[in-house]
Image: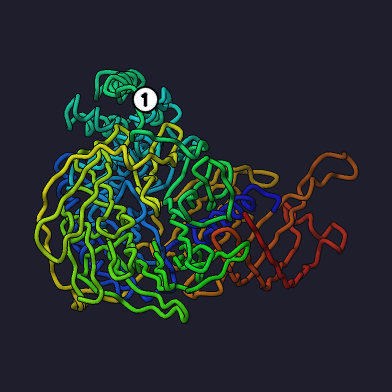
Amino acid sequence: MGSRAGRVLLRMIVLLATLVVPAASAKAQPAAYRHYRTMQTAHFRVVVARGLEREGSVAAAVAESAYAKLSASLAAPRGRIDLLVSDDADYSNGYALVSPTSRIVVFATPPIEHAGLRLNEGWLQLVVTHELTHIFHLDRTRGIWRVVQGVFGRAPYFFPNAFSPSWLTEGLAVHEESRLTSGGRLNDALHRMYARAGASGGDLFRLDELSLGTSRFPEGEAAYGYGSLFVDWLAHTHGEPSIERFIDAQAAQVVPYWLDPAARSAFGMSFGRAYTLWSDSVRRSVAARREPLPGWRELTVHGFFATAPRWLNDTTLVYTGGDGRETNAAYLVTTSGRRTRLGRRNSRSASVPMPVGGFLFAQIDFTEPDVIRSDLYVQRGGEVTRLTRGARLIQPDVRGDGEIVAVQLGPARSTLVRVDARTHAISPLTLGAADDIYAEPRWSPDGRRIAVAHQSAGGRFAIEVWDLALNARVTLAEASYLLTSPSWTPDGNAVVYVSEKSGVPAVAITTVAGPSGESETRSVAPSQSGLATPELSRDGRWIAAVELRADGYHLGIAPTATLATTNERVVLHAETLATEVRPARADSFSRYSPWASLVPRYWYPIIESAPWRGTRLGAITTGSDIAGRHAYSAYAAIPTTGRFPIAGVAYRYAGLRRPLYDFAASQNVEMQGELSSAASHQAVGALLKRTRDVSLGQTYLYPHVRSGASVSTGLGVEWRDYLTDPGELLPRLDSAFQRSYTFPRLFVGAGWSNV
């Protein structure tokens, strides 16, 4: 399209496609084709897919609670907030937008494999509080910005606090999630370990290095980790009201991304000066690095990620990791440090040695557009075989006879299941309570019991041993702090796990004395950087674990004979496994209507030169509903001469699994050249081309985590005719300019990508 308005429409269509169609990556959107239902509270319009009414009710309750708590210290946002709870991705996440309406989308899958999010009283409470903080922060608008929004509405570029750097927006949200709930990442060890590891390694991030797009470890998590610690330090040293003063000051600044004036008014100093003081305090609090265990020897040197070690034999481990420059993969590493790559992985979960050879693992992939599920795979040699499809299984472990135990995900919960060694049929071990989260199951050496990490409602964590034959379980340890990563000693008499009792992940070993009675826990004194995922070798000679360093996680081993432990007597608690769950009521929800979030909420002006003479004045707007079912862009402009208006509209419907339907219509007027008098050779007018176009297309998407394909087909028609300004000049031109032209078209397109 030649004119500026035509290019604007093209850009808006591209934006529309970006908003509605996710790229072939591991990022999902709520599936627009679900049957959605809705309920309203005082401040929220809650939207859920059919079957998630219970989770929607919980989200509504925690959202109203978080709204009341945030309103006590921050200015409340304007209008009702849309809150959608989705269960279409087997990972934990959420996001918030303030344009065109305030809206929050939450993925209900509990954060079983995200270390920094596991400490929570309830996943929905944590994520809703975090995302609602974004709404409170970004919606705040004062001064000239309030005047501008009064004219143009909730346009994306007219929210001053949205210009904040990621360390500030995410740091503030993590600060509030940790202040207002019993969990949160500042009450967990991970963010503080990032800073301690950076300080002890002499590699703390500078303030200008904190970005979601950084290539340094821990990548985008640095903005969350360092940002939250810095904001929390500001709140503690200058008082919680200083945070509100800063938000209000930034919301009125004419240049919103110039943060220091607002920082000085709120904290009495620039952010640069404050960050220097915070960094110095971190360095002073960190002692010189020492080995995490006596006799510790590192087996990996690449940094970034090294997770989930499993012993293949007494001298070889298999782990999952990556160095930040290659795709995630599984590796073999010997106790002498020799490393061999096995094959790529779409997750960082364990690769479990199979009794007949090969490795069992879980990873995510798209099972349909906008839906990502985790399934089980087996790798033997260079061949990978998929065992399940859409089963939502993670963290598998395999018994000597090939029987598999795994975690099956659900909305805000998880349970344990068995997978038959030959048929791969799935059967539940227990249904558990509606808010229970089970994780990291491990078969005992004799194959009769399972050790498992369990989080129950209210944020209680436990390490349990399940005796499947007796249908009973024994609780080895229970606390309000994290207890994770259980594995067995080679003799099957004790369970090794990670305890954060001291505030740093440390190794603990508890003997299993029987269904009840006394037992003993041995705790290893933690290092300042902590240890994760401990694993004893089959001969009991070595303990393998992962240590966090400034450049990432390092896998190492230490001789078990040198472990210095302290002993504690504990009383075991036994009970029968739960067997049923009561369904939730869904009568408070009604049918979802997209119109409340589809009404245009903003416009941008179009001001440009009209062809030949005058100025074209108009407006452009876009919109979409929170479920992503409908999206549109539209513009119109009229020259000050009153002649030759232009307009266009693009619309996408995503209410079916496949295909997506697109409709576009436009009228455009472009100048073709000046008309001159044959006698005087002076310009007397202009020749204009008017183009009217209508198209209808459909797109079929076939996404995968590392690849994607699409096929598009459609039809359209373009009509062209010619005009002159002034109009009486047209009859004096060649007859070719005095007729209309019609150009029907069919189009077919295909695309494929691979990473």
Report the front residue among 548 and 629: 548
Q: Is residue 146 left or right of residue 237?
A: right
User: Can you give x and y, in whole percent of width and height, for residue 273 in the image?
Assistant: 33, 18
> What's the residue at 63%, 42% (across, down)?
609
Q: Which residue in the structure is indicated by mark 1?
A: 200
Q: Nearer the viewer, residue 448 or 742?
A: 448
Residue 97 showing in the rendered view? no
Residue 476, image x, y percentages: 18, 57
Front residue of this view, candidates 501 and 205: 501
525 vs 33, left or right, is: left
Which residue is found at the position 46% from the left and 39% from the top?
219
Q: Amino acid at mark 1?
A: Ser
Q: Secondary structure at mark 1?
A: helix
Within 10 Å of the Cα at label 1, are there few (<14), some (14-19), or many (20+) other Cα atoms? Answer: many
Q: How is the image coloured?
A: rainbow
Can residue 109 be seen in this snapshot?
yes
Q: What residue is rendered at 31% in x and 64% in y?
A: 444
